[in-house]
Amino acid sequence: MILVFVSASAASGCHRAEPRARRTPPPSATVTIVPRTPSIATYSCMQRCHTRLPANPAQRELVEFHTDKRLAHGTTLTWCTFCHQDDNLDRLRLIDGSLVSFDDGHRVCSQCHAERYRDWTRGIHGVTTGSWRDVAQRRSCTACHNPHDPHRTQFNALPPPSRERGREQEEHHE
């Protein structure tokens, strides 16, 4: 016995008179990065202090200003001018020498933390709020990490809700 399978498209002919309607994916959200400068108490550095003081890119112990800053960001970031532009501290410096604003600080982070940056752009790492269909706001790296000492305290995740508690809530809502 020979079985013959005929597809629906073969039975109706290879070419359709009307093209099949394609499903279009839902519109993606517009993601805006929440500006960082409004939350920096000492911004603008140049207007507040550094226009009166000459730039000093020499690595040294800070004894007058910024004594609360502790630079503990790996072995390569050993001084301010690795990320800050030495003659304009209101700008950050990328490895290629181009300058970005503090609001684009995530671009500085991305140069060394490519995997985290990729996860951040996809909404896996970090904080994104708003709507996935309309407008979403994404917090930059510095919303959670201190750029001078970015290590966060480890914490244990809470256990999942118990099944009993879930049943109690379901019964309560009936």
Image: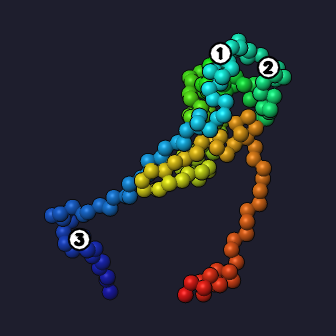
What residue would you read off at disc 1?
Answer: 51
- 1 vs 3, front mark: 1
Whether residue 63 is situated above or below residue 8 in the rendered picture: above
Q: What residue appears at the point 62 percent right and 38 percent down from the top-left corner?
A: 39
- 2 vs 1, front mark: 1
Q: What residue appears at the point 62 percent right and 21 percent down from the top-left corner?
A: 47
What residue would you read off at disc 3?
Answer: 10
Look at the image and tell me in which quarter the C terminus lies.
bottom right
Instruction: Depth check: give the residue in front, 163 or 44.
Output: 44
Q: Is residue 134 visible?
A: yes
Amino acid type of disc 3? Ala
Amino acid type of disc 1? Thr
Dot 1 alpha-carbon crowd within 10 angstroms: few under 14, some 14 to 19, many 20 or more:
few
Question: Does residue 62 appear to the left or right of 162 in the view shown?
Answer: right
Q: CA distance from mark 1 to mark 3?
A: 78 Å
Whether residue 160 is situated above or below residue 21 in the rendered picture: below
Q: Which mark is residue 80?
A: none
Question: Does residue 26 appear to the left or right of 132 in the view shown?
Answer: left
Amino acid type of disc 2? Gln
Q: Single out the residue that lies furthest toward the top.
A: 54
What sort of colour scheme is used for the picture? rainbow
Residue 62 lies, in percent from the top left, at: 82, 23
Residue 49 lies, in percent from the top left, at: 68, 20
